[in-house]
Image (cartoon, helix red, strand yellow):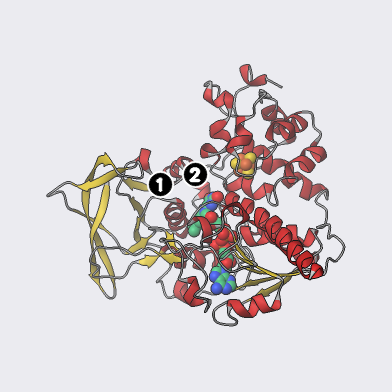
C-alpha cells in the first residue's frame, strides 16, 4: 500500500472517441487484474478514511482496496457488497469526483485520487464472472407482507433487504421492466443494461414478486396496497419534466422521452416515434437545453444516433454546471459543442419542426440564497443557433402523488416531494414509507440505494412494533 508516491494514477483504458461515437457500448474497458491491484495499492490507508465519509453508503473503501491490492478479490467482494446492493453499478455511474474520490486524501495532496469507482466495478464484475455473487439469502418466513411502489434503485434495494429479513415482497412498477432510471434513463454507454438485468434476475430468483405494467393510481390506489400489505414503500422517483419558459414556435422533445426511446431501441424494440423521426437525431442539427446529467446523456446519445451537429446550451458557465465534470469531458471528446452562458429566448420554427434556437448571452451575477451565482441576460446579445431538433433537459419534479394515489392525507413538501419523518423515512400515513428521488428530489443512484436500505430497516422496526402492540392487546 501507500504506492501513490511512485505509482501514477490510471483509469481503465477508455475507448477512442471516434470509436465510441459509433455505438452505445460502455466507454471504459475493464481493469486487468494487475492494473486493479496496482491502482488499489496507491491507497494511503488513512486513519480517518475521508473517502468512506464521502460515500453515501459509507463503504469500507480502504479495506477492500487493501484486499484487492493483495489479490484477495473474493474477500474484497464480500467487504464491498456488505454495504451496497449494487457495487458494480455505483462503480460505473457514481459521480465519484463529488463523492468518495473527491474526498480522497491523496487527491487533496495533489497525487491524484485512488480510482475507487473503477476498482469497485472491477471487484464486483469479477465476482459475477467467478460465481461469487450468491443468491439472496432469504431469512425464515416472518409472516410479514410488504408492497413496494417503484422498481428503481431505491425500491430494489429495499426489496432485497426485506426479502433477506424473511418478508413476502411485492414490487409494483408502471414500466414493463424493473430498474427505473437505470434501465430507461441512463444510456448503455454509461451502464450496460445486462448489468442491471442480472441484479433484477437475482431478486426474481429470491421469490420477490414483480408486478410490472402496474401503475398505482390507475390499477390500484395507495389504500388498496395498505390493505393488502403490512407496510408499503413509495419509491416512485420524480418524473414531471420542467418545461421551457420561452416562447416556442416549434415543439421541443422532452429529454426522458428521447432517452427512453433510445434505451428501448437498445433492447431491440420497435419505437414508432423513433421510426417517424420525432425521437431520432440522425442527420440533424441538435440543440440540447440544460446542464445536468440528463442533458449530458442526451447530447451523447444524439452523437451516437448520427446527428450532424450537437450543441449544449447552458445558462451558467462550466464551473457552475450541475452535471459531472467527467461527463462534460467525455461529451467534448465526442464532438459536442458547449455554449456556456447562453439561455433560450425562443424556439424558432413551425409545428412541423424547429429551425433554430434564439438565445441570449448571460453573465453571472451575485450568489442567490442557494449560494449559486444567478445568471443575468446581457441586453442586446441574442443570436441564433440553427436546429432541426431541440431537446429540453431542464430537470424533473415530483408528480402530484396525493392526487394520483387518491390519498390526500399523504403530506408533501412545498416542492411536491413526499414528506418523511426524519431518519425513519415514514410518511404522514402510518406504515407507509418513502425513499429515493421522491423524497430528495432528483438525486443520485447511490442515495436511492442508501435510502432503500434505510427504509427497509425502518419498515421492519415498525412492523415488529405493530405486531408486539397487537400481541399485547
Ligand atoms: C437521464 C438521467 C441520467 C442519470 N444519470 C445518473 C448518473 O450517471 N449517476 C447517478 O448516480 N444518478 C444518475 N441519475 C439519477 C438517478 O437515476 C436517480 O437519482 C435514481 O434512479 C433514483 O432512484 P429511485 O429508485 O428513487 O427512482 P427511479 O429510478 O426513478 O425509479 C422509480 C420507479 O418508480 C416507477 N413508478 C413511478 N410512478 C409509479 C406509479 N404510480 N406506479 C408504479 N410505478 C411507478 C417508475 O416506473 C420507476 O421504475 C440520472 C437520472 C436521469 C434522469
Ligand atoms: S458507492 Fe459511489 S461514492 Fe461510494 S465508494 Fe462506490 S463509487 Fe464511491
Of the numbered discs 1 and 2, the one sitting upstream in the chain is 2
Residue 316 quadrant? top left
Question: In terms of depth relative to the viewer, which is nearer, 437 or 118?
Answer: 437
Residue 246, compared with residue 83, is above or below; it is below
Residue 59, compared with residue 439, is above or below; it is above
Confirm whether residue 30 shows in the render. yes
In the picture as drawn, the residue positioned furthest to the left comes out as: 380
The residue at 78%/67% (across/down) is 467
- Where residue 430 sits: x, y (%)? 62, 68
- Where residue 143 sits: x, y (%)? 82, 70
Whether the residues at callouts 1 and 2 have beta carbons within 8 Å, the answer is: yes
62 vs 406, left or right, is: right
54 vs 68, left or right, is: left
Number of numbered callouts drawn = 2
Q: Quadrant of ligand 1?
A: bottom right
Provide the residue designation for mark 1.
Answer: 335
Other residues around mark 1 within 10 Å, as few (<14) / some (14–19) / many (≥20): some
279 vs 368, left or right, is: right
The residue at 37%/38% (across/down) is 319
The residue at 38%/44% (across/down) is 321
Image quadrant where one finds the C terminus: bottom right
Give the Cα distance between marks 1 and 2: 8 Å
Q: Label 1's element?
A: loop
165 vs 286, left or right, is: right
Other residues around mark 2 within 10 Å, as few (<14) / some (14–19) / many (≥20): some
- Where residue 311 sits: x, y (%)? 34, 52
Question: In terms of depth relative to the viewer, which is nearer, 414 or 69?
Answer: 414
Question: In terms of depth relative to the viewer, which is nearer, 132 or 263?
Answer: 132
Provide the residue designation for mark 2.
Answer: 17
Residue 215, compared with residue 43, is above or below; it is below
Amino acid at each position: 500500500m501507500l504506492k501513490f508516491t511512485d505509482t501514477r494514477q490510471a483509469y481503465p483504458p477508455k475507448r477512442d472517441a471516434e470509436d465510441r461515437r459509433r455505438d452505445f457500448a460502455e466507454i471504459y474497458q475493464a481493469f486487468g487484474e494487475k492494473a486493479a491491484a496496482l491502482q488499489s495499492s496507491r491507497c494511503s490507508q488513512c486513519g480517518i478514511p475521508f473517502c468512506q465519509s464521502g460515500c453515501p453508503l459509507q463503504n469500507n473503501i480502504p479495506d477492500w482496496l487493501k484486499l484487492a491490492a493483495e489479490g484477495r478479490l473474493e474477500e474484497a467482494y464480500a467487504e464491498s457488497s456488505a454495504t451496497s446492493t449494487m457495487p458494480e453499478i455505483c462503480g460505473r455511474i457514481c459521480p465519484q469526483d463529488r463523492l468518495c474520490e473527491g474526498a480522497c486524501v491523496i487527491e487533496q495532496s495533489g497525487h491524484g485520487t485512488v480510482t475507487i469507482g473503477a476498482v469497485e466495478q472491477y471487484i464486483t464484475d469479477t465476482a459475477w464472472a467467478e460465481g461469487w455473487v450468491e443468491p439472496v439469502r432469504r431469512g425464515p418466513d416472518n409472516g410479514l407482507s410488504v408492497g413496494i411502489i417503484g422498481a428503481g434503485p431505491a425500491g430494489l434495494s429495499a426489496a432485497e433487504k426485506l426479502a433477506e429479513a424473511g418478508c413476502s415482497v411485492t414490487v409494483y412498477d408502471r414500466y414493463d421492466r424493473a430498474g427505473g432510471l437505470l434501465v430507461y434513463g441512463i444510456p448503455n454507454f454509461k451502464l450496460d443494461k445486462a448489468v442491471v438485468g442480472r441484479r433484477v434476475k437475482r431478486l426474481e430468483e429470491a421469490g420477490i414478486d414483480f408486478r410490472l405494467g402496474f401503475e398505482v393510481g390507475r390499477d390500484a390506489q395507495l389504500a388498496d396496497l395498505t390493505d393488502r400489505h403490512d407496510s408499503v414503500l413509495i419509491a416512485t422517483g420524480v418524473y414531471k419534466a420542467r418545461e421551457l419558459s420561452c416562447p416556442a414556435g416549434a415543439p421541443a422533445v422532452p429529454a426522458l422521452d428521447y432517452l427512453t426511446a433510445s434505451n428501448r431501441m437498445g433492447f431491440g424494440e420497435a419505437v414508432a416515434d423513433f421510426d417517424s423521426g420525432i425521437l431520432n437525431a440522425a442527420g440533424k442539427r441538435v440543440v440540447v437545453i440544460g446542464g445536468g446529467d440528463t442533458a449530458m446523456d442526451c447530447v451523447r446519445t444524439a452523437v451516437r444516433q448520427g446527428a450532424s451537429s450537437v450543441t449544449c446550451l447552458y445558462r451558467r458557465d462550466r464551473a457552475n454546471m450541475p452535471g459531472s465534470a467527467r461527463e462534460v469531458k467525455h461529451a467534448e471528446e465526442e464532438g459536442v459543442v458547449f455554449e456556456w452562458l447562453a439561455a433560450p429566448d425562443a424556439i424558432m420554427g413551425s409545428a412541423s419542426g424547429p429551425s433554430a434556437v434564439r438565445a441570449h448571452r448571460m453573465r453571472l451575477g451575485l450568489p442567490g440564497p442557494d449560494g449559486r451565482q444567478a445568471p443575468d441576460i446581457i441586453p442586446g446579445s441574442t443570436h441564433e443557433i440553427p436546429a432541426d431538433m431541440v431537446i429540453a433537459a431542464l430537470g424533473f419534479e415530483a408528480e402530484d402523488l396525493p392526487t394520483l394515489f387518491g390519498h390526500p392525507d399523504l403530506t408533501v413538501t412545498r416542492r411536491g416531494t413526499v414528506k418523511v419523518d426524519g431518519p425513519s423515512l415514514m410518511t404522514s400515513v402510518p406504515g407507509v414509507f418513502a425513499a429515493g428521488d421522491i423524497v430528495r428530489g432528483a438525486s443520485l443512484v447511490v442515495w436511492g440505494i442508501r435510502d432503500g436500505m434505510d427504509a427497509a430497516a425502518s419498515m421492519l422496526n415498525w412492523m415488529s412494533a405493530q405486531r408486539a402492540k397487537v400481541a399485547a392487546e
